[in-house]
Amino acid sequence: MPRKYDDYDDGFEVRRREEEEEPLPFREERRPVRRRRAEESETKKAPLLMRIIAWLGVVVFCFVAGYVGTSLALRMLDKKDILMRKDVVSDRQEAQGVIEGGSTEIRVNARKVAFSVYFPKEGTIVSEKTDILSGIMEDDIRQVFGKILSLVPGGFSQDMKVLNVFRSGDTLFLNLNGPFITSLSKLGAKESTLFITAVVRTITENFPPITKVRFLVNGKVPAEGAPVDLTVPWQLPK
């Protein structure tokens, strides 16, 4: 007899899964495994010496650029007479030129300073105040020394000149020409000693840190001819 599709077999049994039975195996879910990328090579730094040289080059470049730029700017301002002023002087010679020119208004960047000047008089040493247009120390010493000479009338030759004035530490070197020795000889030992002492006292009191004065003649230490000892620096007793 042919089978009908609506026929079914009732010969099966529905069973319920008991808890005691082993659990059905299940497949553990796999996590995707990430492959590590090849480590990127670290950027290598330049050697320390090369970096220092590079920084120094940058600093030098900035300095040179600033210096050149400033110089060009100042030259342009000078050409336009913005910085240059004819009534402003920087030293004694320029001030003298302005004075001789008869300018009604004078402005100088040097200051007028009063110095105590010592000089021999009647067998002793006296002092007086004198005002000079002060600039650098060497020029001031020249002026003060010239003032001392003017206060000793007839004692020194007009041919006597100060050749150089320079300082080393606390010692001042006063370099004069040959007539200096001749003038000291005319003064004699006593007056020469007073004169040298007056010069040393004037310089040490007005121009610190000078404490000693060495007298030279034509750049050399005079070994003979002077009535006083000029082979050693002169210094006032403390």
Image (tube, rainbow, N blue to C red):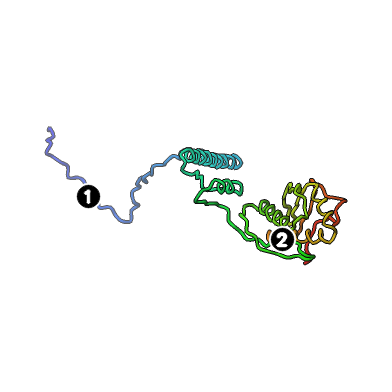
The total of numbered circles placed on residues is 2
Residue lying furthest front: 154
Give the residue number, with chain letter if any, for mark 2: 202
Residue 148 as seen in the image, left or right of residue 65: right
**Amino acid at pointer 2:** Thr
- Which one is nearer the viewer's eye here, 151 or 82? 151
Separation of disc 2 and disc 1 at Cα?
136 Å
**Amino acid at pointer 1:** Val
Q: Which mark is residue 235?
A: none
Residue 144 as seen in the image, left or right of residue 236: left
Residue lying furthest right: 224
- Which one is nearer the viewer's eye here, 92 or 169? 92
The structure residue drawn at horizontal position 22% and vertical position 48%, both measured from the top left corner, is 13
**58 shown above or below 233:** above
Q: Which mark is residue 14?
A: 1
The structure residue drawn at horizontal position 76% and vertical position 47%, both measured from the top left corner, is 159
Q: Secondary structure at mark 2?
A: helix
Q: Secondary structure at mark 1?
A: loop
The structure residue drawn at horizontal position 72% and vertical position 52%, both measured from the top left corner, is 167
* Quadrant of the rendered image containing residue 101: top right
